Image: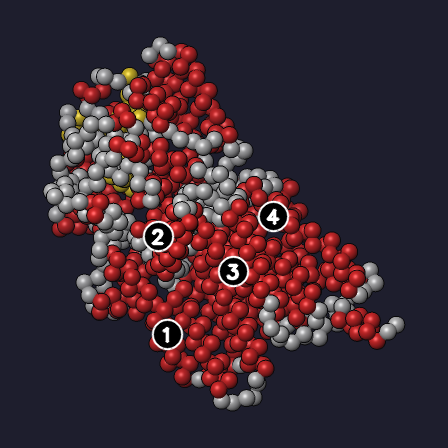
Amino acid sequence: MTQATKTERVRTAAPETPAVEAGPQRPPYLLALVAALAVFALYAFTLAPTTAFWDTSEYIATSHILGIPHPPGNPLFVLLSRAWDILLTPTGLPTAVRINLFSALMSAGTTFFWYLLVHRILGFFDSRETVRRVGAAVSVLVAATAYTVWNQSNVNEKVYTVSMFTIAAMSWLAFLWRDHVEEHRGVRGPSRFHDDNVLVLLVFMLALSVGNHLMAFLAAPALVLFIFVIRPRALANWRLYAFAAVFGFLGLSVHFFLSIRAGLHPIINEANPSCPSMGSAFLAILGFGNIKFPGACENLYAALAREQYAKPSIVFRQAPFWAQMANYFQYFDWQWARSLSGTNGYLGGGRISITLLFTALGGYGAFHHFKRDRKSFLYMGLLFFTLSVGLTIYMNFKYGFAQVQHLGLSAELSEVRERDYFFLVSFSLWGLWVGIGLTQLWLELAEAMGGGNRKLVPAAAIFALAFVPMALNWSYASRRGDYAARDLAYNLLQSVEPYGVLFTNGDNDTFPLWYAQEVEGVRRDVTVIVLSYLNTDWYPKQLRDLTSPCNGRNPASDPTRIICQRAYDPATSPRFYNGTRAPTRPILALSDAQILGTAQTPAIQVADTSTYFRARNIEVKLPQGAYVEPKERFVLEIIRNAWGDRPIFFASTTNEQYDLGLAPYVARQGLAFKLVTPEESRALQPMPTGRDFNPVLGAYYDIRQGQQLLDNVFQFHGLADKPHWADDATRNIPTHYFYAYEALASAQDLSGNRAAAQKYDTEGRKFEALARR
């Protein structure tokens, strides 16, 4: 055997004999860029062509108009995505596509840094550059195609891809810092000062990342441990803390944007974090929702503390810890073969074998990572633990959305949706370890086949496993051709007559409407009111100002700000709505003090069954002992003040019309229910009443308008023909289309038109079937 062959054998020795560390070399930045571009291309190919459900619409709309999303406001995200939006404007791409590409960009940037990170780790496995480059490529492929990572990267549903990018960038900086420290260990002077600069930069990035989300700050424990392991005396340098305090606050100062922009009254201004002065804003940011300094801005402090959500302390668990961890493992089970056993339930028969395989591969990679380089393993291990188990403890979620069904518990005990997106960084990190495990198996297989570089090629067949997540996640992760949320917004807005008030229920029947109005300019005349926000004082004030008569003011002078009632545009509306006068008064005739008093008054109990509410010849009685919350009182006040000046509608996704006793006075119109007077109801088709009353039909029906909406106005983009509905928590969406068609079918049947009834029933059944797929 030649000396060269002997050396080769040593480099590819069995795992019991750790390979000699290859030593820091010039990182392969170009190859990392190629990997990032390849991942970006995958995300772009499977990109959502428009908005999507949950927070997507809120973030696209607030990015586009520089609005304020839900607390804590995410100022860094809003500023970055708006800059990206402007940068891509010359391309002519739709706004939603541009901002969805921002999410793809962030995840592709994560791939860039993960590639460099794994390439460096594999230097402790093998000195051959080919092995390190191929292993890094395989690792980022698995990490990038984990279901949740992929599904969050081809639409801007949340802000966590920015957090993941930040964590990856800081991880690579920490690895570079380590190489520099170990290369110059014992050297005093400029190199040491340079090392401390890197640590200050990490502090700045951590603080700045809080302006996107607290998730990236969870990398701090791993970074501190890594610094301590590499050079503990660095943590004893007082200058580090002095500079860290200054640059840390500079990073946090991005939150001044919230106060400044909120003071300009943007159309979307959640929690209204405006401040009377920059000094009070400074104190609120300094306390950051944890310490309330005297004189701190109340609104900004409340937004940063997320007070409106009133989440309990982590000491008081919203579900048993075992159930919360079981929910995490449920999400972990989705990552490698989501399309198998295609429901959102627990471990599926076909999927469990893939999950166990990738669990073993990741564990094998982590084990050999530990053996080869314990310092970087400690960093990645603690980072993974913090972003999985630690995050589960910190977030303190209720039972999972599907978990309550599996355990036979009440739906009230569960989260409103699945929360897998919170853990996407942990899934990405596990994907890296899977790739490292495959690389180790590749080396062992090549050694078993006789060793040498020539055996690396046939042994590379093991890497076919790296493509399994891409193949088995594609149909669920891809958002290509998905217009469901955008079309729901369009169809619901078009169900409302000009200058109508539309009460909605929550995220999925509200945020897409904001997107349609603020980004696409569809039916801005409609006042969309999400019921849950009516329990605050800031939201009714905004609604009052948004619906005020213009009296010479022009709301189009700055469409991103609340100025006055926005005009009805026939070009974005069905033709049969033309010829409508503008309202003469705001929907609320209450002063700021009156609104505050209503919002702060707790629920009022109805003393007797006498008439509780009267308006335009209708009377509503509520049962004795019923509680009326501030939001209900605001709803009734809006109806009392605005009805007659503008039409009143309830989205079919709400129950408020029934809870307030208004069910006998509503007529279904597309995806909404219109409040009608007894006089108006005489021109409509009465629907079944008494024991046969079906609340999804409404008390009355306008057959002509219903046909116009469903036949000529509504847009579906082939929705009924989708092969499956990917999200259990939004299966009510196709169900509401089913109800809309069934209501029209019933109205046609009652009017004697059996052929039309059969036609609309057949169309409705398609959506009923989709809701079950």
Residue type, mark 3 in image: Thr
Q: Secondary structure at mark 2?
A: helix
- The residue labelled by disc 3 is 110
Q: CA distance from mark 4 to mark 1?
A: 41 Å
Q: Which label is found at residue 470?
A: 4
Q: Is residue 460 left or right of residue 392?
A: right
Q: Secondary structure at mark 4?
A: helix
- The residue labelled by disc 2 is 63
- Residue density around tag 3, few if under 14, some if 14–19, many if 20 or more, within 10 Å: many
- The residue labelled by disc 1 is 247
- Residue density around tag 4, few if under 14, some if 14–19, many if 20 or more, within 10 Å: many
Q: Mark 1 or mark 4, which is nearer the start of the sequence?
A: 1
Q: Residue at x 48, y 81 (%)?
A: 194
Q: Mark 1 or mark 3, which is nearer the start of the sequence?
A: 3
Residue 749 seen by the camera: yes
Q: Mark 4 or mark 3, which is nearer the start of the sequence?
A: 3
Q: Is residue 122 left or right of residue 662?
A: right
- Residue density around tag 1, few if under 14, some if 14–19, many if 20 or more, within 10 Å: many
Q: Secondary structure at mark 1?
A: helix
Estimate the x, y position of residue 196 in percent, counting from the top left.
Answer: 46, 80
Estimate the x, y position of residue 741 in percent, counting from the top left.
Answer: 40, 23
Q: The N terminus is located in which quarter?
A: bottom right
Residue type, mark 4 in image: Met
Q: CA distance from mark 2 to mark 1?
A: 26 Å
Mark in front: 2 vs 1: 2
